[in-house]
Amino acid sequence: MSNLPHLSKPMTRQQLAEKLGICSKTLSRYIKKEGIKVEPRTLLKPKLVELIIKKYLDEEDLFNKVQ
Protein backbone atom coordinates (compact mmCIF):
# COMPACT_ATOMS: atom_id res chain seq x y z
CA MET A 1 0.00 0.00 0.00
CA SER A 2 1.32 3.41 -0.91
CA ASN A 3 1.70 6.23 1.56
CA LEU A 4 -1.42 8.33 1.76
CA PRO A 5 -0.91 12.04 1.31
CA HIS A 6 -2.19 14.24 4.10
CA LEU A 7 -5.48 15.72 2.96
CA SER A 8 -6.19 19.29 3.90
CA LYS A 9 -9.56 19.91 2.22
CA PRO A 10 -12.95 18.31 2.86
CA MET A 11 -14.22 16.02 0.08
CA THR A 12 -17.57 14.93 -1.27
CA ARG A 13 -18.44 11.24 -1.27
CA GLN A 14 -18.23 11.31 -5.06
CA GLN A 15 -14.66 12.64 -4.94
CA LEU A 16 -13.66 10.01 -2.38
CA ALA A 17 -15.26 7.24 -4.43
CA GLU A 18 -13.34 8.38 -7.52
CA LYS A 19 -10.11 8.43 -5.49
CA LEU A 20 -10.75 4.81 -4.43
CA GLY A 21 -11.80 3.74 -7.92
CA ILE A 22 -15.30 2.68 -6.88
CA CYS A 23 -18.79 4.08 -7.46
CA SER A 24 -20.35 6.36 -4.88
CA LYS A 25 -23.11 3.83 -4.11
CA THR A 26 -20.47 1.24 -3.18
CA LEU A 27 -18.78 3.80 -0.96
CA SER A 28 -22.08 4.62 0.76
CA ARG A 29 -22.69 0.91 1.40
CA TYR A 30 -19.18 0.52 2.78
CA ILE A 31 -19.60 3.51 5.12
CA LYS A 32 -22.92 2.09 6.36
CA LYS A 33 -21.44 -1.41 6.81
CA GLU A 34 -18.55 -0.05 8.86
CA GLY A 35 -20.93 1.94 11.05
CA ILE A 36 -19.26 5.25 10.26
CA LYS A 37 -21.57 8.12 11.16
CA VAL A 38 -21.79 10.68 8.36
CA GLU A 39 -24.35 13.45 8.10
CA PRO A 40 -26.29 13.42 4.82
CA ARG A 41 -25.29 16.03 2.22
CA THR A 42 -22.19 17.22 4.02
CA LEU A 43 -18.54 17.25 3.05
CA LEU A 44 -16.34 14.57 4.60
CA LYS A 45 -13.65 15.96 6.90
CA PRO A 46 -10.03 15.21 5.93
CA LYS A 47 -9.39 12.97 8.98
CA LEU A 48 -12.53 10.95 8.20
CA VAL A 49 -11.50 10.63 4.55
CA GLU A 50 -8.06 9.33 5.58
CA LEU A 51 -9.69 6.83 7.96
CA ILE A 52 -12.08 5.55 5.29
CA ILE A 53 -9.30 5.23 2.71
CA LYS A 54 -7.04 3.36 5.13
CA LYS A 55 -9.80 0.98 6.25
CA TYR A 56 -10.99 0.38 2.69
CA LEU A 57 -7.52 -0.31 1.29
CA ASP A 58 -6.59 -2.57 4.23
CA GLU A 59 -9.77 -4.58 3.72
CA GLU A 60 -9.17 -4.77 -0.03
CA ASP A 61 -5.60 -6.01 0.55
CA LEU A 62 -6.87 -8.69 2.92
CA PHE A 63 -9.49 -9.78 0.37
CA ASN A 64 -6.88 -10.02 -2.39
CA LYS A 65 -4.59 -12.16 -0.21
CA VAL A 66 -7.40 -14.68 0.40
CA GLN A 67 -8.03 -15.12 -3.33
Image: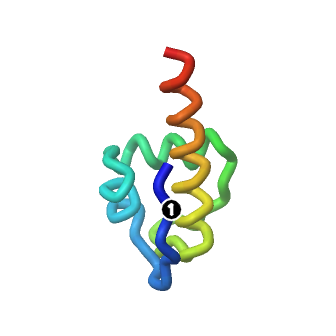
**Count of numbered circles in the view:** 1
The local crowd at label 1, few if under 14, some if 14 to 19, many if 20 or more residues have their Cα within 10 Å, is few
Give the residue displayed 49% in from the left and 84% down from the top.
8
Percent position of residue 65, x then y:
54, 23
The quadrant where residue 59 appears: top right
Percent position of residue 10, x then y:
47, 79
Outermost bottom residue: 8
Give the residue displayed 41% in from the left and 41% down from the top.
26
The quadrant where residue 14 appears: bottom left
Q: Nearer the viewer, residue 42 or 52?
A: 52
Residue 30 horizontal side relative to residue 21, left or right:
right
Give the residue displayed 66% in from the left and 54% down from the top.
36
Tell me if residue 28 comes above or below residue 14 in the rendering. Answer: above
Tell me if residue 64 comes above or below residue 1 in the rendering. Answer: above
Outermost top residue: 67
Residue topped by disc 1: 3
Percent position of residue 22, x then y:
34, 44
Give the residue displayed 35% in from the left and 58% down from the top.
19
Residue 49 horizontal side relative to residue 51, left or right:
left
Tell me if residue 45 comes above or below residue 17 in the rendering. Answer: below
Q: How is the image coloured?
A: rainbow
Tell me if residue 40 comes above or below residue 59 in the rendering. Answer: below
The quadrant where residue 11 appears: bottom left
Q: Amino acid at mark 1?
A: Asn
Percent position of residue 18, x then y:
30, 56
User: Mark 1: which secondary structure?
Assistant: loop
Residue 44 horizontal side relative to residue 17, left or right:
right
Outermost front residue: 2
